[in-house]
Amino acid sequence: MPELPEVETTRRGILPYLRGRRIRAVEIREPRLRWPVSPDLDAILRGEQVDTVERRGKYLLVRLGKGTLLIHLGMSGSLRVLAAPVALPRKHDHIDLLLEGEQVLRYHDPRRFGAFLWLEGDPAEHPLLAELGPEPLGAGFDGDYLFRLSRGRRVSVKQFLMDGHVVVGVGNIYANEALYLAGIHPRRQAGRIAATRYARLADAVRRVLEGAIAQGGTTLRDYVNGNGAPGYFALSLSVYGRTGQPCPGCGEAIRQVRNAQRSTFYCPRCQR
DNA sequence: ACTGGATCCTGACTGC
DNA sequence: TGCAGTCAGGATCCAG
């Protein structure tokens, strides 16, 4: 999926088309996502006005007066705004939100790991959101926080960083990149890293995410933002997907190993 | 409480 | 060209 930068890029791309607009109808062609999409969604949303679109971790929150539409893009999901005349749906175009003014917000997700859920009440209290860690780009995320939370934890620092209960939005690509920037070996135990190194890591996480957002996300396969434009961050990756290629810092060959079922890339010389 | 592993699903790619 | 095997941006759930 889209990690945090791709979700944020999507949010920014679709916001101008959704804010203050009414939903004319909802068309569900394939309800079998991670959880079944409610067949009542059309009845619930028809005629309702969108207040705004927010983001919590990798969840998009479409806020309406009487509730919130929670959207997760899973590993292969994307959202695009289509202008009239709207193209016929392609394979895996599972849901359309028909908007005032003939535009359509279209959800595409080949692997169907994503989610499209209607929530009433405060979304922050929903089980999917209630236990989430802090936003990496917000207050409350820094080296001290990571240091304190990691004491006694024996998992690898990479797994620790990718745990949404620790911090949201850091997926496999950016965990690899941030650990490289911080000079920390991805397999090192989380509980055995000093506070000063966690300060570097928190800083690296912010830098890598902000850099990716600034460039419109990372294009992998057919990722496109809300306007259908590709992201360019892939050009800036230091270690992810660069097995055998020279480390940008020292020239040593980048190594690839498997850690907790996820491909892990690092420089054996720069990362300890 | 923490940890690792299995799991949902389709498509792209590799090697035979 | 076909086929089997592997891997992919996530995160929940379960057993130990």
Image: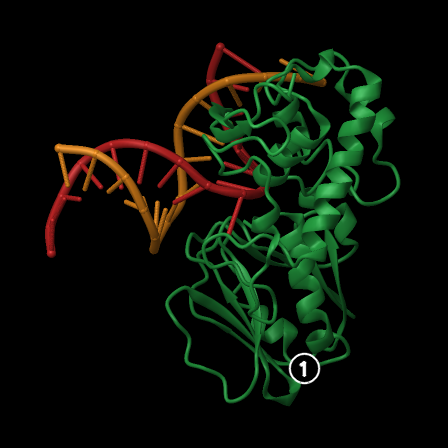
Chain colours: A green, B orange, C red
Single out the residue that lies furthest toward the front.
A251
**Any part of residue A85 in sight:** yes
- Residue A230, position in %: x, y? 56, 63
Which residue is at the front of the view, A69 or A229?
Answer: A229
Picture layout, residue A41 above or below residue A71: below
| Residue A118 located left or right of residue B15 | right
- Residue located at (53% from left, 53% from top): A114
- Mark 1 crowdedness (10 Å alpha carbons): few <14, some 14-19, many ≥20: some
- Residue located at (75% from left, 53% from top): A123
- Residue A65, position in %: x, y? 78, 70
Which residue is at the front of the view, A69 or A242?
Answer: A242
Which chain does tag 1 point to? A
**Any part of residue A119 in sight:** no
- Residue located at (76% from left, 42% from top): A207
Which residue is at the front of the view, A129 or A109?
Answer: A109
| Residue A217 located left or right of residue A64 | left
| Residue A24 located left or right of residue B9 | right
| Residue A89 located left or right of residue A2 | left
Looking at the rendered structure, the secondary structure element under dot 1 is loop
- Residue A25, position in %: x, y? 58, 80
Task: Name the image quarter holding residue A90.
Answer: bottom left
- Residue located at (63% from left, 34% from top): A175
* Residue placed under numbered mark 1 in the picture: A47
Q: Could you tell me the amino acid type at mark 1?
A: Gly
Q: Quadrant of the C terminus of chain A?
A: top right
- Residue A258, position in %: x, y? 47, 24
